[in-house]
Image: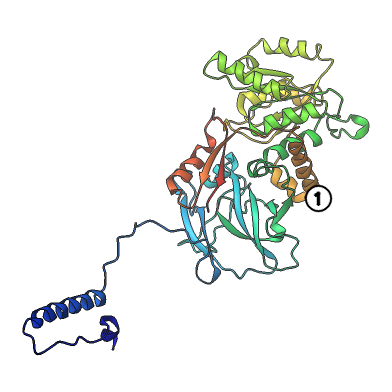
Amino acid sequence: MASSRILGPPLRLPSSSGLARPAAALHCRAAAETATTLLRPHPQPHLPRTAVRHRSGPYGYTQAKALVYSNNGEPADVLKLHTHSISPSIPSTSVLVRCLAAPINPADVNTIQGTYGSKQPLTSLIGTAEPSAVPGNEGVFEVLSAGSPSSELKRGDWVIPAASQIGTWRTHAVFGADELLKVDKEGLTPTQVSLVSVNPCTAYRILRSYGPSAGVKAGLGMRPLEVGSGQWFIQNGANSGVGRAAIQFGKLWGLRSINVIRDRDTAEATDALKDELRGLGADVVVAESEFLSRGWKDRLAELTRKGREQVGLGLNCVGGKSATALARSLGDGATLVSYGGMAKQPVALPVGLLIFKDVRFVGFWLSRWNQQDVVGRRHMVADILGLMREGKFRDAPVDEVRWDWDTDEATLRNAAQRGLEGFRQGKGVYVFGDT
C-alpha cells in the first residue's frame, strides 16, 4: 500500500498495439526507479564536529563550566576547565546565578599555590573526577532564579559574595542566599561592581580604622586619622588596586598621601605613572630608588615641616627593605599596617622604632574583618559603589579576559598564571559573554 501511494494509480497498458508496448515499458521502468529512489535512505550531509551550547539541557538542567584544581601548584599546571550540569531543583534557601565578571587577585593565585593563609575545601559537588575547588574570591553575579518565591533575591538582581572563597571563576553556580550580598546595579558596569569587594574595601577600612597612638590618657589606644585634618599617611605599592583606592579616599577625606612606586624601565615611564597617580589625588609620588636612598630623610623632613606634621599611618603590601623604610618614615606613636607581602621577604623592624618612637606594627586581613562586622561591610560596599556612580571614585585599570562558552582552557588558565606578574597594564578580570 505504501508503494501504491507513492507511485499513484496503476498503469493501463494497451494490448492491441505493439508500438505502445515499448513506450509503456519505459514508462513503467521510470516509475519503478522513481519509487526506488524515494524509498531509499538519503545520505545525511556532514555536520561540523563542534561543541554546541545548550543553555538548558534535558529536563531544564543548566549547562555550566568552572575552573577547578585538585592539587596545589602553579595555575598553568593545575587548573582544569570542568563542564557540568546544574539541576533545576534547587533548595528553597538558594539561588541560581550566572557570573558576569570575576577578577584575578594575587590572593587567588596564592590560594591555588597553597601559600595563602586559608585553604579552600575540596569537594565533588559539581561532579569532578576527584575532590576539587573553584578559585576566585571576588566577582559579580546575576540571579537567574530563586529556590523560593519568597526569596529576597529576584531574577535580574546583581549580587556579590558575602562569604570568602566561594569560588567565582565559573559561568554558573548555586549559592545559598546568605552567601550573597545584593547590590544596586544602577549606573554601574559588571566590571566596576566585580572589583569593589577586595582592594577598595581594604583601603577604606585601613584608613578609617588605623592611625597614631591616642596617648597615655587613652591607654595608648589607637585613633584613626581624622577626616579633614590634612594628616599624612605613606604607602608602598601605590600603583596597586589598594594603593590607587587609598589615594582617592585620602583625597576625598581630607588626608595627604606619600606614595612609593617601583621604578619603571625608563625615567619617562616612571614620570608618566607619577603624573597618573597625581591625577587620582596623590600629594607626593616617589620612586623606590629615591625612597631607599640616603636623601629621602631630608626630603621627608621638608614635606613634614621638619617633623612638625608627622606621618601617622603606613600601609605596607611589599615587605623587605621597603617596609623597613616605611617604618623609619613614621612619626611618634604611628602605626604600620601590613596587608600583603609581594616581595616575599620578611619585615625587619629596628628595635629603636619600637622603644623610642613607640611605632605599632599590625596586620590586616579583610576576610576576618568582614566576618566580624557584616553590617559594616554592607554599608562600606554601598558607600564605595555610590562614589563610583557619582564619578568620585575610579576603579583600577583592568585587562579583560573574555570568557565565552567556547573559550578554551589554556586561555583561562594562562590568564590566572599572569595574576602575579609585575608591570601589567591592568588587573586581570574574567568578563563573561555568551555562556
Please tell me how crowded label 1 is: few (under 14), some (14-19), or many (20+) other residues with Cα within 10 Å. few
Q: Residue furthest left?
A: 18
The location of residue 291, given as percent across then percent down, is 65, 17
Q: Judge from the rendering whether residue 346 lies leftward or rightward of residue 148; answer left or right.
A: left
The answer to whether residue 230 is seen in the rendering is yes
Establish if 234 lies above or below 88.
above
Q: Nearer the viewer, residue 280 or 134?
A: 280
Q: Judge from the rendering whether residue 44 lies leftward or rightward of residue 141; answer left or right.
A: left
Q: Judge from the rendering whether residue 71 lies leftward or rightward of residue 101; answer left or right.
A: left
Asked where in the image residue 263 lies, by quadrant, the reply is top right
The location of residue 402, given as percent across then percent down, is 52, 43
The location of residue 99, given as percent across then percent down, is 60, 52
Q: Nearer the viewer, residue 304 or 41?
A: 41
Establish if 316 lies above or below 24.
above
The answer to whether residue 363 is seen in the rendering is no
Asked where in the image residue 411 lies, by quadrant, the reply is top left
Asked where in the image residue 230 lies, by quadrant, the reply is top right
- Secondary structure found at label 1: helix
Q: Residue furthest right?
A: 217
Q: Which residue is mark 1?
A: 375
How many labels, in total?
Answer: 1
Image quadrant holding the N terminus, namely bottom left
The location of residue 398, given as percent across then percent down, is 59, 35
Establish if 134 lies above or below 44.
above
Q: Nearer the viewer, residue 219 or 371?
A: 371
